[in-house]
Image (spheres, rainbow, N blue to C red):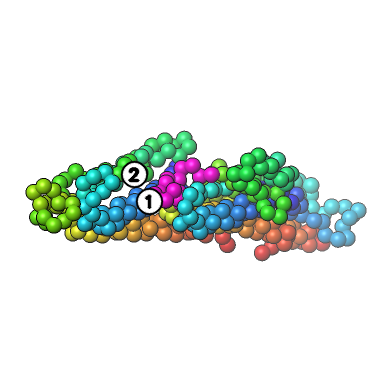
Amino acid sequence: MFEQIGPLARALDYHLERHNVLSSNVAHVDTPGYRPVDLERIEGDFGGALGVALERTNPGHLVGGAGDGGPAAGRVFRDEAAGGGNDENFVSLDREAAKLAANHLRYDVVSAIVQAELRQLRFAAADAKG
Amino acid sequence: MLGVFSAMDVAASGLSAERTRMNTIAANMANARTTRTAAGGPYRRIDPVFEAVLLDRGGLRGSAGVSEVRVARIVEDSRPGQMVYEPGHPDANAQGYVEYPNVNAVEEMVNMITASRAYEAGVTSIDTIKQMARSAIDIGRG
Amino acid sequence: MSAITAPSLALARPHAPLGTEGGAPRVSKDEAGVFESMLGQAVANANSQGQAASAAGEAFAAGSLDDIHGTMLALSKADIELRYVGAVRNKIVDAFYELWRMQV
């Protein structure tokens, strides 16, 4: 009955994690040499379901996945399109703020979709009365 | 159909561009009296050059003439600076004149006000987009 | 809305009142058949609308669809269709019982 809700809940997880990642970019707006990162979706159920810890082949690489070892909601990647500043800091507040706003919006829309789906199930469960 | 998120990207590109302009204005104002630079000669004021880049969103290449702003390059203003007769100045030339930067404070202030207004307009645009999206979300509620 | 298939088809069948099992049916088979096919058609429509709306919702959640108001409209339409089907089914069941009582 609830098979529709699974992918939607995963999308909510993804957007929440992405908010954290983007917020950390904003926090590093003055850190010299900092390159902003972003979170991309993991395609298909296979990517997140196994919860396999990603291996770091180079100490410079970022650690993927949630810290508690649970399945990752997304894959961290370097944002290559961010421009550079004089102090080698690549964070643009406008770019990050726009991404945060868009991400927030998507979260709200998915939340509204989940509400609509559950409302329909609730209606049917109440025997089509109210 | 170009939607909410492409509109936000376009507006955000405007914000970034105006912020770059503010940076150049700040650099000009700070160096208004800099008579010596590493390249020799006085400081030359800089300007950003904006260019329109047609929005490329998946299959909607150049859709509906909507374009983003991008800073193509930063150019130096080649106008000569003002020569002031100051024989005692360490940067004075053989005739005793010092060349000061071609920075005009009034010009920079006007540019700063324009950039600031453009930035505010971009922020208003993004706020409006967000309100429109939230109204759309309310369709699905209740 | 594949999740809704089972409950909605259960809605489609008016339940026989207690005490009539094993007795002769008082409503003719034709009349019951008309009710059931009408409602079955409406339920099928609501189902396909609902499935399309769910697909749109999932596409948005996966990031492949950016259309906010389109998705919301599809979900609202599916919701209204389901409620409509439910209201019609309730009316039909009430009418069915009225007919049942009338024959006594």
Q: Mark 1: which secondary structure?
A: helix
How far across and down, in percent of the image, does residue A122 sit?
69, 60
- Which residue, given by chain and number where applicable, does mark 2 sit on? B71
What's the chain of the residue with tag 2?
B
Residue, x 45% and y 39% (percent of image)? Answer: B57
How far across and down, in percent of the image, does residue C103 sit?
79, 59
How far across and down, in percent of the image, does residue A59 sit?
63, 44
Q: Earlier in the sequence, mark 1 or mark 2?
A: 1
The quadrant of the rendering that contains the C terminus of chain C is bottom right
Q: Amino acid at mark 1?
A: Ser
Q: Amino acid at mark 2?
A: Val
Looking at the image, which is closer to me, A102 or B102?
A: B102
Q: Is residue A69 above or below residue A58?
A: below
Residue C25 appears in the rendering: yes
Looking at the image, which is closer to me, B94 or A85?
A: B94
Residue, x 21% and y 52% (percent of image)? Answer: B35
How far across and down, in percent of the image, does residue A129 sit?
69, 63
Q: Dot 1: within a 10 Å radius of its alpha carbon, few (fewer than 14), some, or many (20 or more) residues?
A: many
**Residues rendered magenta in the picture:** A78-91
- Which residue, given by chain and number where applicable, does mark 1 sit on? B16
What's the chain of the residue with tag 1?
B
Q: Is residue A62 above or below residue A68?
A: above
Tell me the quarter of the picture where residue A48 sits: top right
